[in-house]
Amino acid sequence: MTTDEADPGEDNTFIRQMNQLLADEPPVVGQWFFKQQVPLDGRKFVRCHFEECTLEIETGAFSIQECKLTRCKYSFTTPALNVVKLLNYAHWHLGGLGTDVWDRMLQSVRPFMNADGTISW
């Protein structure tokens, strides 16, 4: 392991801070958002419906459980935008390897699809 690599057993400050941020805020439960700009960071959404909304993501420190997204747009700013750019680059450069490679790569980051059609992650 090089000095730049983190020890897998080492405490991850970002994850700890993200979990604390989500724990400090009460969850948003059962709300319907229609044609709104909705900042997601720092919030936990449970059984909500986002319809024709613009979902704003900066850090990725948010939680969605059993929610429905209908015709939404996504607005990413740094650092989340950097992750989107990396995935976009990987998608285009893995294209020649076939969709099975791309599918395997993204398997770990796909949301969980609930039986009722909602998603969670």
Image (cartoon, grey):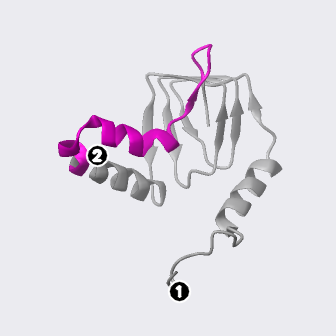
The front one of 85 and 107 is 107
* Residue type at the position of mark 2: His
Q: From the top left corner, tell me how far across and down residue 120 is, in percent.
A: 62, 31
The correct choice, above or below, for 4 with respect to 40 in the image is below
Q: Which mark is residue 91?
A: 2
The front one of 56 and 80 is 80
Q: CA distance from mark 1 to mark 2?
A: 30 Å
Question: Is residue 104 on the magenta stretch?
Answer: yes
* Residue type at the position of mark 1: Thr
* Residue drawn where x is 78% and y is 56% of the image: 20
Which dot, 1 or 2, sits closer to the camera? Answer: 1
The dominant secondary structure in magenta is helix
Question: Is residue 65 on the magenta stretch?
Answer: no
Q: From the top left corner, tell me how far across and down residue 7 is, in percent.
A: 62, 75
Segment colored magenta: 93-118
* Residue drawn where x is 62% and y is 37% of the image: 121
Pointer 1 or 2: first along the chain: 1
Helix, strand or loop status at disc 2: helix
* Figure quadrant of residue 44: top right
The correct choice, above or below, for 13 with respect to 113 in the image is below
Helix, strand or loop status at disc 1: loop
The correct choice, above or below, for 47 with respect to 80 in the image is above
